[in-house]
Image (spheres, grey):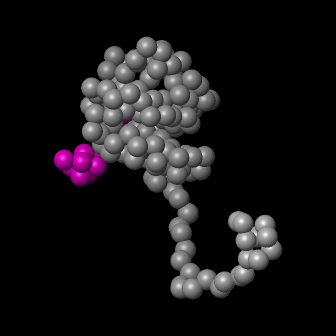
Amino acid sequence: MDEIARGTARAVPQEGEATLAPKLSIADGALDLSRPAEEVLNRFRGTTPEPGAHVTLDGARLKVLAALRGPDADLAPGALALLGRDVVMGAGDGTSVLLKTVQPAGKGPMAAADWWRGLRTTDPRVEVPATSAERAS
């Protein structure tokens, strides 16, 4: 940057073969909660806004629109809990992901706490693919 500012930068041709990156699919946005929270959040950031990060709850896709690193919690991967006013999802290695904004299938975006209050299940759990859980072991 300094060389550009001074006007002394020289163009250098790139070397090597060109590589193509395939377009991300909806499947690429699936969050694998058997992985540690930092890896889950890296996937979240890499797929937001398109194709969109999501988890599966009761067979339906729940889009994750805003999330942060949650506190270390004694939650199994995929388990959901309300801690104070925050909804957290258990991730691998005893870490958690704090949900801020979600979008249930067929509904508009909403605060995760509002979504939580409308759940009709007593023990919500996000699906963790068996192959992912086996990899984490």
- Name the spot of residue 104 as percent of width and height, x first: 52, 31
Seen in the image, is 87 located left or right of residue 52?
A: left
In terms of depth relative to the viewer, which is nearer, 9 or 20? 9
Q: Quadrant of the N terminus?
A: bottom right
Query: Vertical placement of 28 versus 9: above or below?
Result: above
Q: Quadrant of residue 94?
A: top left
Seen in the image, is 92 located left or right of residue 62?
A: left
Query: Vertical placement of 112 versus 97: above or below?
Result: above
- Name the spot of residue 119 as percent of width and height, x first: 44, 19
Tally of marks: 0
Query: Vertical placement of 133 versus 89: above or below?
Result: below
Residues shaded magenta: 125-137
- Name the spot of residue 6 as percent of width and height, x first: 79, 70
Q: Residue at x 41, y 38 (%)?
A: 56
* Direction left: furthest residue: 137
> In this orientation, does residue 105 appear?
no
Residue 130 magenta-drawn?
yes
Q: Residue at x 59, y 50 (%)?
A: 50
Q: Quadrant of residue 36?
A: top left
Q: Residue at x 54, y 69 (%)?
A: 21
Q: Residue at x 55, y 63 (%)?
A: 23
- Name the spot of residue 98 as percent of width and height, x first: 45, 29
In terms of depth relative to the viewer, which is nearer, 14 or 46? 14
Query: Vertical placement of 3 versus 13: above or below?
Result: above
